[in-house]
Image (cartoon, rainbow, N blue to C red):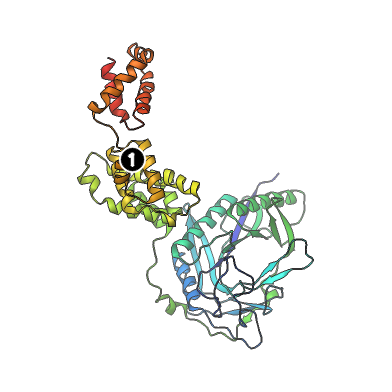
Amino acid sequence: MAKYEPVIGMEIHIELNTKTKMFCGCENGFGLEEKPNIHICPVCTGQPGALPVINEEAVKKVIKTALALNCRIPELSKFDRKNYFYPDLPKGYQISQYDKPLSVQGFIEVDSCKIRITRIHLEEDTGKLVHPAGASHSLVDFNRAGVPLMELVTEADLRSAAETKKFCQELQLVLRYLGVSDADMEKGQMRCEVNISLRPEGSEKFGTKVEIKNLNSFRAVERGIEFEIKRQAEALEAGEKIIQETRGWVDGKQKTVSQRTKEEAHDYRYFPEPDLPPLEPQKIMAEIGPLPELPEGRRKRFAKEYNLPAPDIEVLVIKKEMGDFFEQAVSELGDWAKVAEPKIEAEKLMKLMANYLITELQKLLTQSGAEFKNLKISPENYAEFIKLTAQGVVSSSGAQSVLKEMFETGADPSHIIEEKGLAQMSEESELENAVAEVISQNPGPAQDFKNGKEKVLMFLVGKVMAQTKGRANPQVVEEILKKRLK
């Protein structure tokens, strides 16, 4: 089989989290579990004589996104009518943008690869068709009709399923950091469509483009592209011609199926929307203010300021609330590591703080089904917990017990340690009796250690830990055992 190179571009639709819809005052309730057709009015249902009014907040969110993605903001933009007939499109046309979008010519870097963005424009969403199980009819819910929809179109710069998946994930992070959308794919707030063709390796000419729809997860994006690469390659090898069409991803069968031949722009008979005035995006841009820190900026800053391992940084970037909590707790530490405990390196302290967040605390959240935003532990108490753990006030097993109690009650770690008697025993005088008792109860292993079997020492340390209910400092116990068994 000849070797083919995939050429991939993306069209991504993002529901904006505005208070109201794009051209009317109806509540933007899309994505909420509510009754159908309750967020509707004459404008978003296309009643005769109803006129649209532009949602300023939606326009600003698009321009804000465009600036974050290095786009050029033009002097003039306008809305157009995109004409097609479908049951979920109440007006018989969609108010969108064609030749003068709100932004053009941007890019986003993913793993040092620059993916060019052709345009980001603004339009209204359609309604939603509902197909009752076993029924011979379909229903239409217009709650989504008119919701502000941002469409981002890339150049065909992507070359693999894995790279495309990573691009979509990074874009979702950017949208969440900007606060323009939750971009939850399961709720339809971010909908990805792939344009893919194959060409012989080394060729500059593009092959015939196929669009894949119904990709409602990052996994579906990756699997859909992998399937389509295989399908097109086999067809080309068999001498078949690839036709330009729209195909749908069927998750249950893990395959794409033909839906319809692909429309061209002229099929939609675009013309300027006569009921809406043109926009001056550059003037609107001046009202937006500075952008927040974006995911890549946080990655670089966390590496520089906290010297954390790359996998830990990635978790704290992806889980933004956790990353924010981490920084708040770090600020509560202040100069404590340098002044109060000079023996504790700041780097180790940061790793300890990140480790308990990413492993133990995340485990508690997962087990309870709780969300991070509802965490009872305050950054101040978490910083105090890290201090006590770093100082050896509690053992590692004791620290887990303390953190669990903090998670359930939000209590101060010092109070928990005192109330439950979890303070670690580090004084030799406290541990002498426990060590002596373990040696007398385990004469065989004690003699084995004297005879040079050093591995048996950990067995004896474990016995002392069990006898002290995990409170003994294992390093101190090890030293006492060595002295006694010389």
Residue 325: give x, y in percent of width and height: 37, 54
Q: Is residue 278 left or right of residue 476?
A: right
Q: Is residue 322 above or below residue 259?
A: above
Which residue does the image show at 30% across and 22% down from the upper left?
435
User: Between 119 and 182, which is closer to the camera in this rendering?
Assistant: 182
Number of numbered discs on residues: 1
Q: Give the residue furthest to the front.
A: 419
Which residue does the image show at 56% across and 78% down from the upper left?
26
Q: Is residue 216 left or right of residue 479?
A: right
Q: Amino acid at mark 1?
A: Lys
Residue 125: give x, y in percent of width and height: 61, 72
> Which SS class for mark 1?
helix
The residue where tag 1 is placed is 420
Residue 227: give x, y in percent of width and height: 68, 50
Q: Is residue 377 above or below residue 267?
A: above
Which residue does the image show at 62% across and 53% down from the upper left?
220
User: Between 105 and 153, which is closer to the camera in this rendering?
Assistant: 153
Quarter of the rendering containing residue 30: bottom right
Q: Give the residue furthest to the right.
A: 136
Q: Is residue 443 left or right of residue 204?
A: left
Q: Is residue 158 above or below residue 34?
A: above
Residue 336: give x, y in percent of width and height: 23, 47
Quarter of the rendering containing residue 193: bottom right
Q: Evaluate whether residue 348 shows in this view.
A: no
Q: Evaluate whether residue 444 shows in this view.
A: yes
